[in-house]
Image (spheres, rainbow, N blue to C red):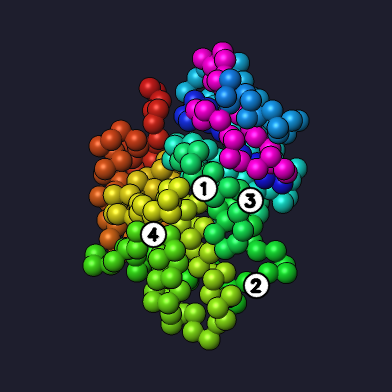
Amino acid sequence: MKHLLIDFENIQPQNLDKLPTEDTHIWLFLGTQHKSLPISLVASLLPFGERVHLIHLQKSGKNALDFYLSYYLGKIIATDTDAQIGILSRDGGYDILVEHILEKQEAKGVVRLANIDDVQHTKINTKPPTKILEPHPQPENSLKPPQPLAPYFQAALAALRQPNAVRPSRLHNLQQKLCKYILREQLQGKTDEECETTVAQIIHRLKSQNLISVNSQGVVIYHISDDDLLQKIQRYILNIKPKTFTEFQAAVQKRADALSLSSQVDIQAFARHLREQNHIRQKKGKIEYAPFSSL
């Protein structure tokens, strides 16, 4: 079953006319300030029937809607093992949750989408290999890469991050470059279908981790600069909150390795940056996170 969770505080689509109604659940999360909905949106929700779920916050609070959405996302995963999930929100804070779900393989697919055009372009029901909610892992009857995806993914990301790299501006060209040039050696001896499957999974992971975004015209936008990746590491650290500096170092290093940043991260300088931004305090090897105790 497909599920689209809409953070209506963050994005207010006027309609969902281009989305498939069959086997798709719509979860609309409304803040306390939302007392009415556009007629065009209500009309486009009607064909979904009982598969429309309205969740209206009863009380306001910082990140309250995020917590509601995360709670219902967990319920979906717990009750629908075949769930293919899209989160419609510009809030990058969901990326940590998306990455965790993918790492744990708790759902067939999950991705955050920054605008309704992305949902409509990828359609939740599009055909392989470009389906944005591609099952993860692949069904048993489909071809799988003979090795874990991580080596391919890290090789692709490292190549795209090279200072002199030519990054294709179109999705089709990016797929071709990954298959025929960047991963040519790693994919040597594989069938065309195996290559396409591997590249599709890499593209999916790049999207789900918000390392690239693709608009409705198939134009690729890259979010892989040093600043982009350091922001991802910062969000990761502030989410998991390692309690000691040793744990902090290990967590930063692990995330940096996964993002091909390991040789460029000065962990001491990174910790200093978080202190200067009043995100953390350090004392005797221990780390405290904002908001800080007054004691």
Left or right for 187, reference 39 = left
**Which residue: 45% across, 36% down?**
91
- Residue at the spot of label 4: 170
Circle 2/circle 4 CB separation < 8 Å: no
Q: Is residue 68 above or below residue 255?
A: above
> Which residue does the numbered mark 2 point to in the structure image?
143
Which of the 4 image quarters holds residue 144?
bottom right
From the image, give the main secondary structure of the stretch colored magenta. Answer: loop
Q: CA distance from mark 2 to mark 3?
A: 19 Å
Q: From mark 2 to mark 1, how far is it between C-alphas?
A: 25 Å
Distance, label 4 to label 1, CA atoms, is 14 Å
Q: Position of residue 32 (x, y in %)?
A: 55, 16
Name the amino acid type tagged 3: Asn
Closer to the chain start, of discs 3 and 4, is 3
Secondary element type, mark 4: loop
> Distance between the Cα atoms at labels 3 and 1?
10 Å
Specify whether 251 is left or right of 67: left
Name the residue that disc number 3 marks: 125
Q: Nearer the viewer, mark 2 or mark 4?
A: 4
| Residue at image point 50% right, 68% down | 199
- The residue that appears at 39% across and 28% down in the rendered structure is 292
Q: Nearer the viewer, mark 2 or mark 1?
A: 1
